[in-house]
Image (cartoon, helix red, strand yellow):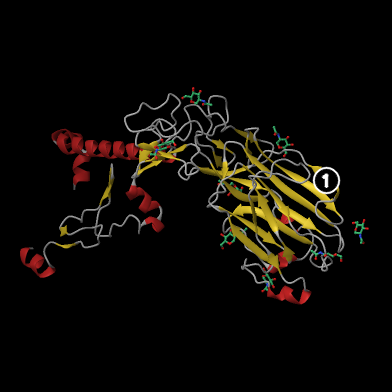
Amino acid sequence: ETYTSMTTPSQFHSQPLPVILLLFLFLSAATHLLLEAAAAEQDQQQRITRVGCADKCGNISIPYPFGMEPGCFREGFQVTCNDSSNPHRAYLANNGVYQRIVEYYDREGWYHQDWHKEGNNTPLELIDISVAKAEARAYGAVSSVCNPNESDYYSKCQQVWLGPFLLSVTRNVLMGVGWRIEPMVTSNLWSPLRGGDSSNEFTLTCISDLMGLPQFLKFAANGSCTGRGCCEAELPEAFPVPEFGLWFRSGRNNTMFETTPCSYAMVVEKSWYNFTTPDLYGYAVLPKRFPRGIPFVLDFFITNGSCPLKGQQPPPDYACVSGNSYCENATSGKGYVCKCLKFYDGNPYIPDGCQDIDECKLRELNPELRDSYPCSSDGICKNTLEGYDCPCKPGMKGDGMKGTCMDKFPLPAKVIVG
Ligand SMILES: *[C@@H]1O[C@H](CO)[C@@H](O)[C@H](O)[C@H]1NC(C)=O
Ligand SMILES: *[C@@H]1O[C@H](CO)[C@@H](O)[C@H](O)[C@H]1NC(C)=O
Ligand SMILES: *[C@@H]1O[C@H](CO)[C@@H](O)[C@H](O)[C@H]1NC(C)=O
Ligand SMILES: *[C@@H]1O[C@H](CO)[C@@H](O)[C@H](O)[C@H]1NC(C)=O
Ligand SMILES: *[C@@H]1O[C@H](CO)[C@@H](O)[C@H](O)[C@H]1NC(C)=O
Ligand SMILES: *[C@@H]1O[C@H](CO)[C@@H](O)[C@H](O)[C@H]1NC(C)=O
Ligand SMILES: *[C@@H]1O[C@H](CO)[C@@H](O)[C@H](O)[C@H]1NC(C)=O
Ligand SMILES: *[C@@H]1O[C@H](CO)[C@@H](O)[C@H](O)[C@H]1NC(C)=O
């Protein structure tokens, strides 16, 4: 009816109001859609760097204080992006941060090397950076020791210098894989070769020992890292160190060099490596499987100073510059980290970096978060600046967050009212 009446010009003129109303409704809906799209886009592209700075290397996000170009990173946090591979690869560019491999060939006795060779210092390749956790993950090398025969051994050991960063004691473990092996990690890279001060040396070991007998190899079990083919040790809390090295305490007398010539050691992200018995057999199995390396976790923090006391003027280079952020002394006691306040999320190290969390959008996009942000299907999720609300749908009373929405009028009453 409306359609036909609107097709004739005379009627069109006689009925301007509905048309204008329609037009208005259409325009306001369109504007609303546009605004929503813009907001979504802003959400997706919430800035993580300083203005004008690249925020990605390949598919790795590089949030400030990390950065690539001059002016884009805080001192010590430079990242270089190597574009010769696809996707591009990111490296920690601070030249105090690197790893190297030291090789030894030993015939007999403790550190009576026939020869040894120190490899080149190579930068650490980044896997990812988490500002919220104040940690970065990087690829580290697998250390190995292999026996060409019963008496000799050849080892390749990792040494790491972390500069302004620390090895995370909670997120990494020492792991050893081998039928008879005692890997150790030391904190100050003292070595009998290099000499130096061993007084503040920290040593942590774990032992995997199948009694040195082939018939005990069957006691190694997949997924088990309890000293039979695989061992694991937690890093003690006193061990957030800026450098570490891996060594092997035993390497000789491998009566099973023909079947199990090699053993391995690694400081690796907890729960990442899953031991399987075939890893005991064959030559350089783990380095071949993980040619880029294995992930380990670094703690990062602002090294210059500590959190300003209440009422104290922060220093000019204070890092926690976003609104809705706060400062927390680093657990190592060697600096501080910045965090977003509860209900906020983002990068506290840049202005306006901490943004209100839209819990409603989050639970919509991530069903696994629906338990953390409850709102029943009878409720309407509404984001607010500090959290969110979940009132019941019209005609209902109760609390959508608790899932207690029910009809204001029970069905029989409704029927009567209707
Ligand atoms: C980057 O892409 C590689 C595969 O190309 C993937 O394995 C890796 O998890 C991605 N990293 C991030 C941080 O998304
Ligand atoms: C980038 O990586 C390639 C291949 O790994 C290497 O040859 C090259 O030297 C690297 N470039 C820089 C600038 O580090
Ligand atoms: C062990 O192997 C090395 C070469 O890999 C050889 O030089 C050495 O003589 C061998 N030792 C014995 C006891 O066979
Ligand atoms: C462990 O799993 C591998 C396959 O991943 C299998 O070949 C091997 O036999 C298993 N070892 C034991 C002891 O079950
Ligand atoms: C290794 O073998 C040599 C000679 O057979 C022996 O003297 C030495 O005690 C053995 N070492 C270990 C750690 O078993
Ligand atoms: C080990 O198993 C866990 C859990 O199944 C998995 O997340 C992880 O990726 C595995 N690690 C490797 C190196 O495959
Ligand atoms: C450390 O802080 C002091 C005082 O705030 C400042 O003068 C100095 O430049 C800062 N050093 C670095 C490396 O940022
Ligand atoms: C942070 O550390 C500094 C220096 O170690 C100390 O004076 C300050 O009280 C600490 N602040 C907090 C909040 O713990």
Task: Please state the horizontal and vertical placement of residue 394, each as a whole percent of the image.
Answer: 17, 55
Taking the spot 86% from the left edge, 57% from the top edge, the residue there is 108
Q: Nearer the viewer, residue 84 or 134?
A: 134
Q: Is residue 300 left or right of residue 110?
A: left
222 to the left or right of 237: right
- The answer to whether residue 181 is seen in the rendering is yes
The x and y percentages for residue 191 are 74, 45
Answer with the quadrant where ligand 2 appears in the image.
top right
Instruction: Name the secondary structure under disc 1.
Output: strand
Residue 165 rendering spot, x and y as whole percentages:
57, 39
Please say if 224 is above or below 287. Answer: below
**161, above or below 234, in the image:** above
Q: Where 220 sits versus 11, above or below?
A: below
Q: Amino acid at mark 1?
A: His
Q: Which residue is mark 1?
A: 116
The residue nearer to you, when weighing 241 against 35, is 241
Judge from the rendering whether residue 256 lies leftward or rightward of residue 122; answer left or right.
right
Q: Residue extending furthest left? A: 416
**Rendered-image quadrant of the C terminus:** bottom left
Q: State the image quarter where residue 4 is shown.
A: top left
